[in-house]
Image (spheres, rainbow, N blue to C red):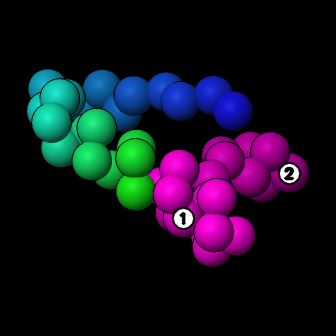
């Protein structure tokens, strides 16, 4: 798994930690998450 920042603005550390942890927990439960790169579509 690669985790990359979105750098169009300053990253808020505490909010980023919560978001990343939530996505990791959702993946562990087999739930879908947003922000997945679709290599076939090119983004």
Q: Please indicate whether residue 23 sits to the left or right of residue 13 in the image.
A: right
Q: Which residues are magenta?
A: 23-43
The answer for how far apart the CA atoms under marks 1 and 2 are is: 24 Å
Q: What residue lies at 70% left-to-right and 70% top-to-bottom?
A: 30
Q: Position of residue 37 (x, y in %)?
A: 66, 48
Q: Position of residue 8 (x, y in %)?
A: 25, 31
**If the image is split into quadrants, where does the N terminus sit?**
top right
How many numbered markers are drawn? Answer: 2
Query: Which circle's residue, 1 or 2, is located before the other in the chain?
Result: 1
Q: What residue lies at 64% left-to-right and 59% top-to-bottom?
A: 28
Q: Position of residue 39 (x, y in %)?
A: 80, 45
Contact flag, marks 1 and 2 (Cβ < 8 Å): no
* Residue 40 among those drawn in magenta: yes
Element class at badge 2: loop
Magenta: predominant secondary structure element? loop
Residue 3, numbered label = none
Q: What residue lies at 18% left-to-right and 43% top-to-bottom?
A: 15
| Residue picked out by circle 2 | 40
Q: Please indicate whether residue 6 sits to the left or right of residue 39 in the image.
A: left
Residue with the most extreme right position = 40
Question: To which quarter of the image does residue 32 belong?
Answer: bottom right
Q: Is residue 34 above or below residue 13?
A: below
Q: What residue lies at 33% left-to-right and 50% top-to-bottom?
A: 19
* Residue 7 among those drawn in magenta: no
| Residue picked out by circle 1 | 26
Q: Please indicate whether residue 13 sits to the left or right of residue 30 in the image.
A: left
From the viewer's perspective, is the residue at label 1 or at label 2 nearer?
1
Neighbours of disc 1 within 10 Å: few (<14), some (14-19), many (20+): few
Q: Position of residue 38 (x, y in %)?
A: 74, 52
């Amino acid at each position: 798994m690669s985790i990359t920042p979105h750098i169009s603005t300053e990253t808020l550390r505490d909010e980023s930690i919560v978001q990343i942890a939530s996505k990791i927990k959702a993946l562990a439960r087999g739930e879908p998450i947003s922000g997945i790169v679709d290599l076939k579509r090119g983004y």
